[in-house]
Image (spheres, rainbow, N blue to C red):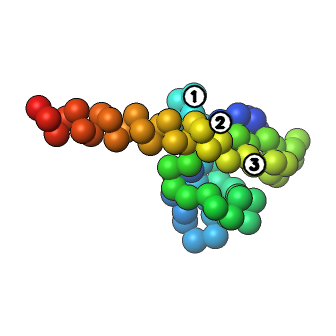
């Protein structure tokens, strides 16, 4: 049973999107690309809700959280480059 919550869009495999559950970043969930917002890209943070049969009910792109995560990674890379 897929859990509702926040996922990172890890990668695309053919017509499927591979999502990682943000709480542990190890639990993978596969959903069809057609379930994603058209602007979704690798690295985006999404809120996903599932129906009882594990089909996708709703996907929301969390733009602010995605931007904050990207900024955090960029800051860390810049810090490492300065060492």
Is 21 placed above or below 53 here?
A: above
- Asked if the residues shown at circle 2 and circle 1 are in contact, with their CB atoms under 8 angstroms apart, the answer is yes
- Label 2 or label 1, whichever comes before in sequence order: 2
Q: What residue appears at the point 81 percent right and 48 percent down from the top-left corner?
A: 58
Q: Dot 1: few (<14), some (14–19), or many (≥20) neighbours within 10 Å?
A: few
Q: Where is mark 2, residue-wise? A: 6
Q: Residue at x 50, y 36 (%)?
A: 68
Q: Quadrant of the C terminus?
A: top left
Answer left or right for 80 relative to 46.
Answer: left
44 left or right of 34 in image = left
Disc 3: which residue = 59
The reply to whether discs 3 and 2 touch (Cβ–Cβ < 8 Å) is: no
Answer few, some or many: residues within 10 Å of disc 3's Cα (few below 14, many 20 plus, some between 14 and 19): some
Residue 27 seen in this snapshot: no
Disc 1 designates what residue? Answer: 23
Q: Residues within 10 Å of mark 2 (few under 14, many from 20)?
A: many
Residue at (52, 42) in percent of width and height: 67
Please give the count of numbered marks on the rendered protein: 3
Q: Does the rendering let one see residue 29?
A: yes
Q: Earlier in the sequence, mark 3 or mark 2?
A: 2
Query: What secondary structure is marked by label 2?
Result: strand
The quarter holding residue 2 reads top right
Dot in front, 2 or 1:
2
Is residue 18 depicted above or below 1 in this figure? below
Which of the marked residues, 1 or 3, is nearer the chain's N terminus? 1
């Amino acid at each position: 049973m897929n859990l509702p919550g926040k996922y990172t869009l890890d990668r695309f495999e053919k017509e499927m999107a591979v999502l990682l559950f943000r709480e542990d970043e190890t639990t993978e969930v596969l959903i069809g690309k057609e379930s994603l917002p058209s602007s979704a890209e690798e690295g985006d943070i999404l809120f996903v809700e599932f129906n009882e049969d594990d089909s996708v009910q709703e996907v929301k792109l969390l733009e602010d959280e995605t931007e904050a995560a990207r900024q955090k990674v960029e800051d860390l890379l810049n810090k490492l480059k300065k060492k």
